Structures are given as C-alpha cells and as structure tokens.
Amino acid sequence: MMMIIAEFFVVILKVLWAFVTAGARWVVRPKEKSVAGQVCVITGAGSGLGRLFAKEFARRRAVLVLWDINSQSNEETAEMVRQIYHETETPIAKDGPVGGVEEVPAFQPQVYTYVCDVGKRESVYSTAEKVRREVGEVDILINNAGVVSGHHLLECPDELIERTMVVNCHAHFWTTKAFLPKMLELNHGHIVTVASSLGLFSTAGVEDYCASKFGAIGFHESLSHEIKASEKDGINMTLVCPYLVNTGMFKGCRIRKEIEPFLPPLSPDFCVKQAMRAILTDQPMVCTPRIIYMVNFMKSILPFEAIVCMYRFLGADKCMYPFLAQRKEAMNNNEAKNGI
C-alpha cells in the first residue's frame, strides 16, 4: 500500500513538472532541430498547406518527397522547391591541393514527385514502396491531404461521405503503416497529422468533415500513446489543429460580422510557420490561434446548451451555411453548362 501511495506522489510531481515545462515553452522558445538531408514525405503537396510545408522544409534543406493526386500541380510545387534549393545553396570552403582554399558544393538535396491517390490503399502502399526503393527510408511523414464535400448531410451523396472519411482519416492509417515500421526499427522519425479545429469541436453542415477530422485526431492520439508505450523516444508526433485557413477550401464561411475582426481566417503562411515551429521543436500539439486551446477546454466542461448559446452569439452555429450555399450554386451552374 505504501508503495502505491509513494508512486502516486511521484506521479503528481511529474504532472506538475509537465505543467512547468509546457509553460516554459511559451516563455523561452526551444531550439529548432535540423532536418537537413532528412527524407520528408508530404501528402497533398500540390497546393494549399502542403505546398507551403514543402517550401518550408526545402528552406531547411530536407529531401522532399511530394505526393499528390494532381501531377501538374505537384510538379509546380517541385519546381518551387528546386528554386529554393538553388537560392539557399552555399558552397563549403575546403583546403586545396596546394595549400589554397577551394569551394566545393554542399550537400544538394533533391525533390521527388509521385502521383498518389491517398484515398486508395493500394496506391499508398505501392507508392510507399517506390519511395523506399528510389529515395530511401522516410524520416518525416506529413499527413496533410484533405478534402471537403460541401453538402448538408441529407443532400450529400454517400460516395462523397466515404471519400471524405477515406482521404481525411483512413489514409493516415495506410501511410503510417507504410513508413512507421522502419521508424520503430531505427528509433527515429516524426509523424505530423494536419487536422483541424473542427476535429476538436464541431459545427453544423459539415458532419462528414468533422467526423473525419475527429477520427484523424483520435488515430493520432492513440498512436502517440502506443509509441510512448513502446518506449521509442526517438519518434516524435505533432498534431496540427488550425482554425479556418484562408486557402479557399471553405470559401464563404462567415461568423458574426462584429466578431470576425477578432477571429479572421488564418493566413496559410502564418498557419504553416506556426506548425513548422512546433514540428522543429518536437511540440506534441499546436492550435492556431491559441484561443483554440481555450475553446476546446470550455467545450469539455460546459453543458451542451451553454455551448449552443455561445455558438449562436459568435455566429458559429451556421457559419458554414454561406459556404454550402456557394458550393450548391456552383454545382447547379456546372450542371446547367453541361446540359444536365
């Protein structure tokens, strides 16, 4: 009995110390680790946040492996990465053969592109095998690819619901199963889940999207615990949960106009820079902006009716309705043009 009590007090001390170290990270910025030469796979790299992640890792001289379903946009990202490699290339001074100093090229990272539909399990596994064969073992996995159907639940075709769940959630299982075994063997790696604040708390009209992001977060958290249980301290996990990002995915989404100046859509560049800081300092989770932490905490302790009142005050209860209306109008216009 005394052993249990003693162990319980040790646990309390460790919990308190975890609070202290977490608070210190907010005050003193931890040193960022180097990813130069490390192989980084980014899904959904052809546009949006995926493209910005690729550019940020390129500036840090990582070897980029870009996955996207769209070959053209993926190649456009690759060209941007090559340009960054060229701009950041710095020769290394080395003693010459006759006592002089000569400049030799520094390590030159490369970028590789693969057309991969992460919504298809066979495509993920076959592409992962190509990466291992042509590039090498993967050090960093950025699960970024995502889609949204843009329909109310009762108007959404089952195929689109399934597509949202598969791309936003199930694909994380397959990419992780493809690359995690070698990470475990080497006790080295980093897995990043790009989720959403809508995976922490939900709103009306995007049931499939919220469910997929809740699922991705649940997968990420369970995997984090499994890695901790296996005592593989060389493998890190980072969960990225941004508020609405101005990439066009949710174009038209609006909260109450009086509140919007205080909670505007996030700049994609700002969102990715915050995520990169978290990744490079091995931060387990990053919510952008920081008020998302408070909203998530309040959602956990407040009665549901209190949450509904707050949603209505903020205009968050129907914030997706303008977006859904725009998507529906665009679809009707396309059908009219095609003579359907």
Image (tube, helix red, strand yellow):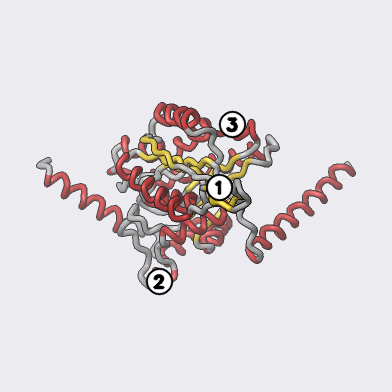
Label 1 close to label 3 by CB (< 8 Å) = no
Residue 109 shows in this picture: yes
- From the viewer's side, name the closer residue of 24 and 203: 24
Amino acid tagged 2:
Pro
- From the viewer's side, name the closer residue of 237 and 103: 103
Q: Is residue 246 left or right of residue 304?
A: left
Residue at 42% x, 39% y: name it: 112
Secondary structure, mark 1, is loop
- Distance between mark 2 and mark 1 Cα atoms: 39 Å
Amino acid tagged 3:
Lys
Say which residue label 3 marks.
182
- Spot occupied by residue 266 in the image (x, y as percentages of width and height): 42, 62
Residue 202 shows in this picture: no
Say which residue label 1 marks.
36
Residue at 59% x, 45% y: name it: 237
Secondary structure, mark 2, is helix
- Spot occupied by residue 233 in the image (x, y as percentages of width and height): 68, 41
Q: Residue furthest left?
A: 339
Say which residue label 2 marks.
261
